[in-house]
Structure formats: C-alpha cells, structure tokens
Amino acid sequence: MTSTKPQLTVLVGAGSSVAAGAPSTAGLTRAVVEGLRAREPYSCAASQFRDQVEAILAAADDYYHPGAESGEANFEQLLDVFESGAALAVGWQAHTVSTTSESCLTRARPDLGDALTPSFFRECVHVVEQTVLDAIIEASRVDLEQPLLAGFRAWWRALGERFDLTVGCLNYDTLIESALDLGAANQGFVRIAGEGTWRLSTDLSGPACGGHRLFHLHGSIHFGAREYGADPNRFAYDAGFHELYWHPTPGAAYQTMWGQSAPRSQSGRELGGGRLLTGLHKADKTLTEPMASYYLEFCNQLVRSSRLLIAGYGFQDHHINAALRRFVRAHGGRGRVAVVDYMAAPERDDLGTRADMQVFLQRFAADVVEIRQLRSSPQDLGGDRCRVYWKGLTDADPKSLASFLLAQ
C-alpha cells in the first residue's frame, strides 16, 4: 500500500541521543583518555608508551584550547592526531612501500622515525576506536520502557505518525531504529539467501516498510563483514573488499571484524574505523559501502523534500554541511526547517562552536541570524520558514513541530 503521509527529511546528530542516555562527546573522550592511560601496550615498553601518550595529549589539548586552564581535545581530534602520526610514521620507515605524501615529506628527516613507530600510533588508533565502539554497544543495551527512553520513543513515534521519515543518522547506536521499530529493510538491506547477513540494495529511492527509511551515514554497530557461509565468491566481482553488511545483533557484527584490514584513501592513508566512521577524515571514510550510497541518496532526498528537521547536529562535518547546502539551493524560502538543539543560554554560548549552524540558518532564512539573540524557545527566524528549538528534544512538542513543518 502506498503511503499518503507527507515526506520529512531528518538529520540526527549525537545531541538527540544524549537526551536518551547515550554517551556524550565529553564522556567518550574521558573513556578514551582513560583507556590510553591504562593500556598495556604491545608496541613498546609501558613507560615509553605512557610518556608518549601523555606528551601527545598535552600537545593536543594546548593546540585546541591554547592558554585554557581546563579543556581537552575531543576523541575525534585525538583520533586525527594518531591517524596523522601513523601516516607520518609509515613515511619515516624508508624501507616500507607507501603511497602517502607523508613518506615524501619525511625523507629529509629519517631520524625522526627513531622516536615513534607506526605500531605505536596504530595501537593508539585501536584504543580510540575500540573504546568508542564498546561504549556505544553498551549504551544500546537499553530498556525502552525506562522513563527517559520511553519519552524518547514516544517523541519519535508521534512524529512518525504524521510523516514518512527519511532519517540520515550520524550516530552509531540503535536508539532511533528501536524508537521507530525499524529493521534491516528500513535501512535499505536485503537478505542474503543462506546467510544470516543482509546486503545493501542497489535501489534506496523507494519507500521502505512502514514508510520510514533510515540511513546510518557514519556507520552502525550492526555493520560488519560478510559471513561467507554459503558462497564466498557470490559477490566477488561487484562488491568492494571493504563493503559492510547488516547483522541482526551488534554481537554478531562484532565477531566478523577481527583482522579486517582498513581501506585506504586516494593518498594512501589507512582510514580505519570500519563500521564506525569517526575522526576528521569522515568524507574519505564515507566511500565505503553502505555509507557511500547512503550519502548519495540522502543528498537526493534533501532536494526531493522541502521539509527538514535537524536534531542534535553540531554542524561540524563539512560533507554533511555540503549536503545541507543542496537543500538551501533547492528550496530556499519555499522550504521549512526546524532545528532542535540544546543551548543552556544562547547569549552566553561560545559562538565559535555554533558558527556553522548560524551560517546555515542565515543562508536558509535569507536574513541576519544571531544565535546569541535567541530568547524564546521555539523562535522563528527570517519570517516563518525557519524555527529553532534550543532547549532540547524534550522541550520540542512533536505535534507543534509537525504543524509548523506542514504549514504552507
């Protein structure tokens, strides 16, 4: 049966899941730093490993928060430091074969390679990625009947009753699919005969079960490698080596990723991450399926639908911001945008962390937008086409939100 509900495109960031008990960026950063400090290393002596880690942590904190008495680089920034170090360290090893530009830059100072090795940096990268993965898996083991999560579920279900949702999710957890009862089919996957895994369909443009679609733009804890149970050569010619598949449980996906090599960027950098795309090189990492197809279809959806909800997104990912510019160009003043975020006090908010949000709102509203001047929540900007709810998801009534988005 063809759905008669209107379409709504939704972009979901980490801020929306934090409201339901998922770990925050600060919480994940603390866990990563603790994991690095407690690591029993294999790459070098424990004392050397910890001294090097502490020196890098201090340098990163000073770079991202110069002169601050407190403040630390977040886990994505730390991952970028370690990934960059790994690329440089490979370059320092003159006897290795590398296509990275870093190998050219370091030939003039090969002695630098005596201090830090690729194995040290790769071990640090592994700690960051594994810590984040474990935290997200644990956060997804939730009882949706708990009061906080019951409210989260009711909020999304109320919105889903008014619209067919196409959700571009930047989170790795399963909270959105649990709230809306979305399975593999809603995420564009089809079952592989004879195996327990599902593979991404070649057509993501059609309506999914129940009218809702979910695209995990930055990966998911349900993504993993193939089982290879029935015919290991079945997709030998049309599948990329690093293509990911959907597994019924995070545990099943977890078991398939051991020993999985990382894809490389065109410059030759190891991208790592696998099923969770994090760090500051997400645009390169997005080239792995299913994220590549998800990103393309989400961009197309932004052009098709003139209604957009952005929930808990910090506007820090350049490739996502580029997609949002397509929406502005396609719909301009004819579309409707609602932004749901949490700002304790906009007039005291550090505009440096909200600059890209302000740029997007200003482009869409075609008017001067000052986030620091937000007073009431919700507040309309640039007429009645753009609305900001700045007290968080729980303060945004889904019925009122739907009425705003449906207005002509």
Image (spheres, rainbow, N blue to C red):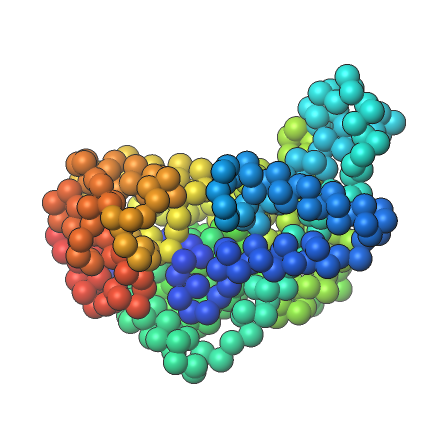
Image coordinates of residue 6 in percent, x first then y, are 25, 59
Q: Which residue is drawn at 54% across and 69% down?
A: 139
Residue 247 picture location, percent across and down: 62, 65
In the rendered view of the protein, which quadrant contains the N terminus? bottom left
- Residue sitting nearer the eye, 49 or 10: 49
Residue occupying the point 80% across, 34% down: 115
Asked whether, in this view, residue 315 is left or right of residue 227, the answer is left
- Image position of 139 (left or right of 350): right
Q: Residue at x 75, y 22 (%)?
A: 106
Looking at the image, the residue that sits furthest to the top is 108
Quarter of image, res 335: top left
| Side of 336 relative to 230 (left or right) | left
Q: Could you say where residue 22 lies in the image, as x and y percent from the top left?
A: 48, 66
Q: How many labels does the image show?
A: 0
Residue 203: tell me if it is visible.
Answer: no
On the image, which quarter does residue 221 sit in? bottom right
- Taking the image as shown, residue 376 lies to the left or right of residue 193, namely left
